[in-house]
Amino acid sequence: MDFKEIEDYIAFTDLSRRCYPGMKLHSQEDQERYTEHRRKMAQKDDIHTIGLYEKEQLVGGYIAYDHVMNVYGQQVQAAGIGTVAVDLPYKKQGHAKRIIQHFLAKARDKGQTVAHLYPFQPSFYKQMGFGLGPRLSTYHFHPSQLPSYDEGEKVEVLSADDQEEVKACYDTWAGENHGATAIPPYGFAFLEKEELHTFGVREEGKLTGYVTLEFKEGDHFLQNDVHVKNFFHTSTKAYRTLIHYLHNQKDQVRSIYFPTFDQEFAYSLNDPVHVDEQLIFSIYHKVSEEGRGLMYRILDIPAFLGKTGEARFGTDTVRIGWKVKDSLLNETYESVWQYTDGKPKASDEEAEVTIEVDIAHFSSLMMGCVSLSSLLRSGAAVSDGRAVDLFQHMDQPKCWTFF
């Protein structure tokens, strides 16, 4: 078995068609369109389409993405992986594990510190050392439930001609939010799609926020629902202007689907109750649907520590001896970190407390997706010393990059 860059994209399309029926690559036209898309994207410097071959037969493959990720305010080289596929006759032969191991090895060779992915099955990737990422909530409400603001600014229609401004606005947002990844120019192709509508707000001539909407018809042509696809803002005024714009759709829109990482968004709504008006337990009203998609794996723990040296993970002062086990790569990382008022630094002194944890839970913990107290309570992490008041109210990552 050998790995190499894919050149035959027709074969990759056939592989994808069999492994991912949900892609609906049924017709010849659909297959040709997908083949051309994959061939075009493979020309990008940050996208790598890799095949697993048995002699000349393509038996599996994946797509690797080079990302730059904001990790607690620092720019970190990261690796994404998607479209992991093993052809049907070759399943249950360990090829998926080989693919992940190859991807991780290549990412390390390139100096990438963190890997992330969207799992087809979270339990599978947890076994591969990837930890659960942030919680995403999707609200569904009538536009009138949003607050109305009078900020004095108006929204305007944005098009492909505004791509540089939209990218600059997003880059500003990404630079302020832990977990965000830089998006290359081709990632703003949504501005060219006829079914998507993007509206922006400017302050003193500078774009400070934008929202992308998709309208979907309800039971008849006068009945529409709005699905929010993008919602970015770099100022309070931009946020309020965009919210006010959505509020004003109340006379023509039946409901809004609004995805967010903001766990306090319900407090912004006049009535946060979900449109299906279901009770989920006793008399608790359903306000949103939530899920977890993105998963993280730290590839280089010392490098990650170096990048997070200015971050604070609480206020405790303590020396922790970390023991992080990685069963997939058959590695164990052991080191002492001195936390001074929550700020970490490598130490040669003896640990006051030792914490044992696997790489998946360690990655979730370090990225701010789970508290240390929760891991200790559940047994996912084990401590042999005093209580540690760190990693309790973390800055949850926010990532809107899909790959």
Image: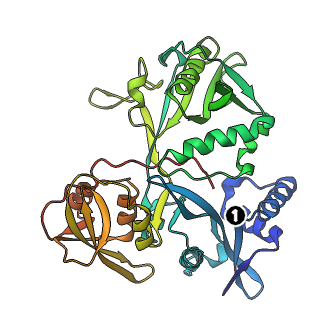
Taking the view exactly as shown, the residue that stands out farthest to the front is 204
Report whether residue 215 is seen: no
Q: Split into 4 quadrants, where in the image is the N terminus?
A: bottom right
Which percent across, then down, holds residue 228? 60, 32
**Could you tell me which residue is drawn at 70 percent across and 69 percent down?**
48
Taking the view exactly as shown, the residue that stands out farthest to the left is 386
- For label 1, the residue is 46
Residues 109 and 376: in front is 109
| Left or right: 396 as drawn, with respect to 85 | left
Name the image quarter holding residue 324. bottom left
Tally of numbered tags: 1
Residues 380 and 347: in front is 347
| Left or right: 147 as drawn, with respect to 62 | left
Name the image quarter holding residue 403. bottom right
Asked if residue 21 is positioned above or below residue 254 in the image, the reply reads below
Name the image quarter holding residue 53. bottom right
**Image colouring:** rainbow
Q: Secondary structure at mark 1?
A: loop
Which percent across, then down, holds residue 209? 61, 31
**Could you tell me which residue is drawn at 70 percent across and 15 percent down?**
222
Report whether residue 311 is seen: yes
| Left or right: 306 as drawn, with respect to 87 | left
Which percent across, then down, holds residue 52? 68, 79
**Could you tell me which residue is drawn at 81 percent across and 36 percent down?**
161
Q: Tell me the amino acid under the disc marked 1.
A: Asp
Which percent across, then down, holds residue 117? 54, 60
**Could you tell me which residue is drawn at 40 percent across and 61 percent down?**
308
Q: Residues within 10 Å of mark 1 (few under 14, many from 20)?
A: few
